[in-house]
Amino acid sequence: MGDNLFEGLPPPSHHQQPEEKENEEEKHEGKENNDQISFSLNTSSSSNNKEASPTPVLKSAFKRPKPSESNPEAAVQEKRLRFKMTTDASETQVIEAMQKIASHIKNPTKFSKASKLAIQLVQAGSVKVGTSEHFFAILEAAMSSTASCTDSSVRGDYHSLFSAAQDAAECLNKKQKNQLTIWTFRAVMANDFLTDDSFVFSKTASKLKDEICSLPFATEEDDIDEAATLKDETETGNDEDARQALVSFAEENNKDESDPFGLDALIPRSGKNDDRAKGKKDVTNKSRKDDEEYAKRFLQSKREALISCLEIAARRYKTPWCQTVIDILVKHAFDNVARFTSRQRDAIEKLWASVREKQIRRKQGKSVSGKLDVNAFEWLQQKYSTEKISIRHSVGASGDRRCQQWLG
């Protein structure tokens, strides 16, 4: 019992230092083991998730690959090939295409497709001075078709074709432009009167009134030319051919009798200068007469086209919102009836009489449905025609002037 209990043991300071080191080393090793275990678990779980879930598709995979910056010429060439248009066609190819379109556009069943091809040529800028004659042949063939411009099956295509033709009008000569103007009246303005849009109908009526005002006043000579044209149209083609044959036969006989041996060509002529001057004068007079005749024919065709548009507009009288516009339009034509020829004046007078009769019947309520067929404008006009309106607005509006006493 009296022995020393701490005998043989190391001193206390020496024993504590290695124990602390050993404890620190054990803790450090345990932490590293835990980190390794957690890292292995994370890697295993992430690998399992990668194997289980499919790889997502990047949006950049759907994009077009950009050309390499090192080769800019390849990028320019790719753009050129991508945006290459049909405008690079030669003039010969364009002419051949126009000839094919002109041959097919006469057929009503092929008119829609052929007109769209013609519009594409205009939009591509293929109609130039060198190809304008062939493009005009397309328009001429379109107007010579058996189908009418206002036919429900093709009127939309007619409207689109001749509306697009206005962009190529600068390539045409004067006579072709005048003819295009007349065709535009029949193919565009006439079809605008068949619309269901009241704004377009009213706008087209205003255009027609302006065109009527631009016409010159008709003369007696215009009436005579119109009667002669109608007479020529009634004559048959056989009589005309027979007349031409007789005239040519008589000219040949006169020539043979005047120079039976053909010696006039061998005799020298002394007045060559006089003959040349006379020939130039004859050519000038002939060209002047031709221009005058063409101006008369153009004016007559323009009047006929405007009359046709007026008649087409008058057929829409059954539509309630068209009635007031038609009344004003036909009245305007009747007021300017002196600008038309005799036959056209008769047509306008009959048209105005028909519109006046319908207008009176509509105001009286004598319609097919049995109801009062009066539009809003006429109802308000009839209402306020019997009203007494005072200049003092709300004071004494009845017009009896009873408020003057206390107003002083």
Image (spheres, grey):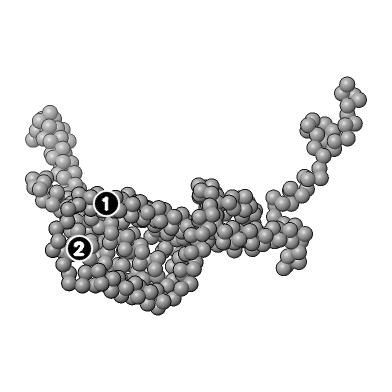
Q: x%, y% of residue 284?
A: 31, 50
Q: Amino acid at mark 2?
A: Gln
Q: Quadrant of the C terminus?
A: top right
Pick whichever, 232 or 190, lies toward us.
Answer: 232
Q: Amino acid at mark 1?
A: Lys
Q: Which mark is residue 93?
A: 2
Kindly tell me whether residue 152 is visible in this rendering.
no
Q: Which mark is residue 31?
A: none
* Residue at figure coordinates x 35%, y 62% from the top left: 139
* Residue at figure coordinates x 16%, y 39% from the top left: 23
Pick whichever, 138 or 339, lies toward us.
Answer: 339
Pick whichever, 190 or 179, lies toward us.
Answer: 179
Chain-order first, disc 1 or disc 2: 2
Query: Where 334 falls versus 32 (above or below)?
Result: below
Kindly tell me whether residue 391 is visible in this rendering.
yes
Q: x%, y% of residue 99?
A: 26, 67
Q: x%, y% of residue 187?
A: 45, 61
Assign a secondary structure to mark 1.
helix
Left or right: 198 as drawn, with respect to 288: right
Cα gap from disc 1 to disc 2, whole angstroms: 46 Å
Query: Where 236 falls versus 175 (above or below)?
Result: below
Neighbourhood count class around disc 1 (C-alpha, 10 Å): few under 14, some 14–19, many 20 upward = few
Assign a secondary structure to mark 2.
helix
* Residue at figure coordinates x 36%, y 71% from the top left: 106
Q: x%, y% of residue 287?
A: 33, 53
* Residue at figure coordinates x 72%, y 68% from the top left: 368
Pick whichever, 331 or 296, lies toward us.
Answer: 296
Q: Which mark is residue 278?
A: 1
Neighbourhood count class around disc 2 (C-alpha, 10 Å): few under 14, some 14–19, many 20 upward = few
